[in-house]
Amino acid sequence: MLLTYKTVLSKKVQLNSNTYLFHFDLIDPKGLVFKPGQYVILKVPSNKGPVSRLYSIASSDNYKNSFELIVGLIPGGLASNYLYSLKEKTEVIFQGPAGLFSLRDNNRTKIFLVTGTGIAPVRSIINSKFKFQNSNLLIFWGLKNYKDVYLFEEFKKFNIKICLSREESLNMIPEVDRKYFDLGHINKAVEGQFDNSEFYICGGRNVVESLKLFLIAKNIPLENIIFEKF
């Protein structure tokens, strides 16, 4: 059974042109217990009553009295308009937690294939307490342009490759940071990474389906493909 949480928006940070980080403090109940990778359900006020929208928790499970979301806002969207206009200290209602997108407890290498704000549950997972070594974690994050990148100083601490699908060169990136980037889509960058690995896919519905088919064509067993669509 899902719980209902009364929260207050304590911080709102713009990450790029249309992506924001929202920090919510819990009012009642005071604590949120979740598995890194799960989502919460935002209850968006409307004339016809609350409308539900699902957002992956983007913060560590080490913090029990607050959580963060990373949300890409879509012009004209009901929830996007609500979140864009949301002011700090405003009360917000959520339900949850829910979802099965979580790290499995085994010794396989974990490879994350994510696009856009699909990085949110991965951020929760890698910043939470888990016993896997960083060397057994690989993150391939697909974005369109270099200007879309956010929280880079945080993510570069991990084994990450940011794949820029609409750039023609990496010359705009400081030379010391270019090793974290690649040109093209993430399916190109992940070639050669298929031995004894589990693949965690998160992103838009079409992208997730495409990457799943790509992995199946590489003879990855379905039981080693874990995915979340949004």
Image (cartoon, grey):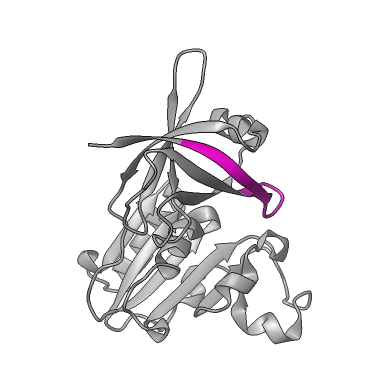
Quadrant placement of the C terminus? top left
Q: Is residue 98 magenta?
A: no
Q: Main secondary structure of the magenta part?
A: strand
Q: Nearer the viewer, residue 148 or 67?
A: 67
Q: Residue at x 57, y 40 (%)?
A: 9
Q: Nearer the viewer, residue 108 or 224?
A: 108
Identity of the residue furthest to the top in this view: 47
Q: Is residue 194 above or below residue 67?
A: below
Q: Nearer the viewer, residue 182 or 131?
A: 131
What segment is highlighted magenta in the picture? 7-20
Q: Residue at x 32, y 51 (%)?
A: 33
| Residue 27 point in image, percent of width and height | 45, 38
> Could you tell whether 70 is left or right of 164 in the image?
left
Q: Is residue 175 visible?
A: yes
| Residue 111 point in image, percent of width and height | 39, 73
Q: Nearer the viewer, residue 54 or 113?
A: 54
Q: Is residue 217 above or below residue 15?
A: below
> Could you tell whether 152 is left or right of 200 in the image?
right
Q: Is residue 183 visible?
A: no
The quarter of the displayed image where residue 133 is located: bottom left
The count of marks equals 0
Identity of the residue furthest to the right in this view: 172
Q: Residue at x 58, y 77 (%)?
A: 156
